[in-house]
Amino acid sequence: MRAPAQFLNTSDASWREWELNTYRTATATGPAHHAAALTRSWWLLATLTAFLTGCTRSGPPADLVIINSVEPGSLDPATATGIEELRIVMALFEGLTRVDPITARPIPGLAEHWTISADGKTYTFHLRENAWSTGEPITAGDVVYSWLRVLDPMTASDYAGQMFYLKNAEAFYNRRLKDPAQVGVRALDDHTVQIELVNPTAFFLDLCAFQTFAVVPRQAIEKFGDRWMRARPLPVSGPYQLEAWRVNDKVRLRKNPRYWDAANTGSELVDLLPISTPSAALNLYESGEVDIIWDKEAVPAELLEVLRMRPDYHAFNYLGTYFVRFNVTRRPLDDPRVRKALAMAIDKQRIVDKLRKSGEPVATHLVPPGVANYQSPPGLPHDPEQARRLLADAGYRDGQGFPTIEYLFDSSGGGASIIHGKIGVEIQQMWQRELGLKVELRQMEKKVFLKAQSSLQYDVSRSSWIGDYNDPSTFLDLFLSNNGNNRTGWKNTRYDELMRKANLQTDIARRAELLQQAESLLVRDEVPFIALFFYNGFNYYNPERVQGIYPNILDLHPINAIRKKVRRLTTNH
């Protein structure tokens, strides 16, 4: 299928201008005609862009097709970090527990059941008669190997800190302890794993469902080393096998017949597409070639106000925060007064109203509302006058003598990079207008961007964090001195101590009080980041065609629970 000649060699900007004109035409006749006009216009656009979106994709059609926003960087549970990666990893590799598709709470996974000691520090898991997709048994030794692999610094897992709740795990990771047998995970026999924790950890079962704790195939890793994900067939422990990973085309998953719960796996064949532009994603959905769009950035932002009126637009609250990191190792960003001034000069409400258009709440603190057993303290308000005073106190009255700083954002694919850039422009203008500062914008490809963050090769960078489990620590642990995802250079012994004391607490109210003190230090006193807004969740699918997707606060939707509805044929007599 070919697109009209005027679009074959045009720029993406021209293409978007045509889309906007189409939208204006569709909505010019008034609200009563929006839906029908929009459908007709986007059906035409779907035809025009089929040339650009891979209408000749190879292989048999999948039972379920999902827009997964961007190309995954890694499908190794130990090194995957992006949500687009973790969704796929969850389908390939399972942990001792897994996520309930309705509540997002932990339920039995590879472990059939478990017991917890009276002091809450020892867990004993009893495994099912599980098998790898290649037929070998999954043993307690595989669990131990998988967890110790995450703690091996050579694996370079950004999520290794999630394992530090285990006895001696942090010392082993930092090589203060060399004997892996001293780490609090051991196999009592082939089907029994015993875990010893440093302290009682109320959300430990949630952690066991997180992808970093998934069980990976020792036999493949030891044979192929860093290239083990290329093994075919790839041994997997989850509900799906990796049939193909074609870069910039799709990740294809096929049902794993040896998975313990294979009888309840919803779809035989699933494709996840890394579509790079919002128009292409929406076009494929409108033309029926795609069943689900996960992310808000995967649809055109200028159409959100219209799309929100449709029955296939599903919005809900979930645990996600969009923020800006500071590299506090660079002057003048090493001065908390400067960081506070930059935070208070930003009009966050303007950013949300102008650019997001989907009702997301402004954030002044890190932990989103709705998290279990916790309420955050307020952070810094929007106050340009106070921002100017703070900057003057730091020696930069009216911005004089303040060096040019760089605002870094990533080319995430989909509509995300466009939004990140627009937010950067707004912040650039606000800092110039309110404080007299000069800011340069710089965009990087996502893998390079993440490397720059990790190595502190930036001044200011856009960031976001999605909760891994329903507890404030999934956000607050992020800024511990030893956390691989900190990426600010900020270290504070008082903050670390408050978090340590909080994790020793079994009293919920006292724990919350200590966490509030820690977060107040983070968002009012030290400010190594600026929270901008809290995400609200978004799924785009037709409930008449797709079932098994449930709104939950973690926005986690196991693929094996999703299936197409079977259409029943009716006979007229």
Image (cartoon, helix red, strand yellow):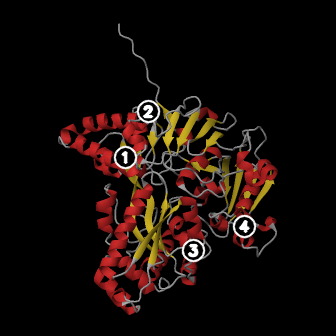
Residue bearing the label numbered 1: 15
Viewed as shown, does residue 171 lie left or right of 452? right
Q: Of the residues tagged 4 and 1, which is closer to the observer?
A: 1
Residue bearing the label numbered 3: 456
Q: Name the disc covering residue 213, or none.
A: none
Give above or below for 2 relative to 428: above
Residue bearing the label numbered 2: 2
Mark 4 or mark 2: whose residue is earlier in sequence = 2
Viewed as shown, does residue 80 lie left or right of 289? right
Can see residue 499?
yes
Of 326 and 438, which appears nearest the observer? Answer: 438
User: Label 3 is placed on what type of residue?
Assistant: Leu
User: Label 2 is placed on what type of residue?
Assistant: Arg
Mark 1 or mark 2: whose residue is earlier in sequence = 2
Near mark 3 (Cα within 10 A), the count class, few <14, some 14-19 or many ≥20, is some
Q: CA distance from mark 3 to mark 2?
A: 45 Å
Give above or below for 296 relative to 451: above
Q: CA distance from mark 1 to mark 2?
A: 15 Å
Can see residue 380?
no
User: Label 4 is placed on what type of residue?
Assistant: Pro
Residue bearing the label numbered 4: 153
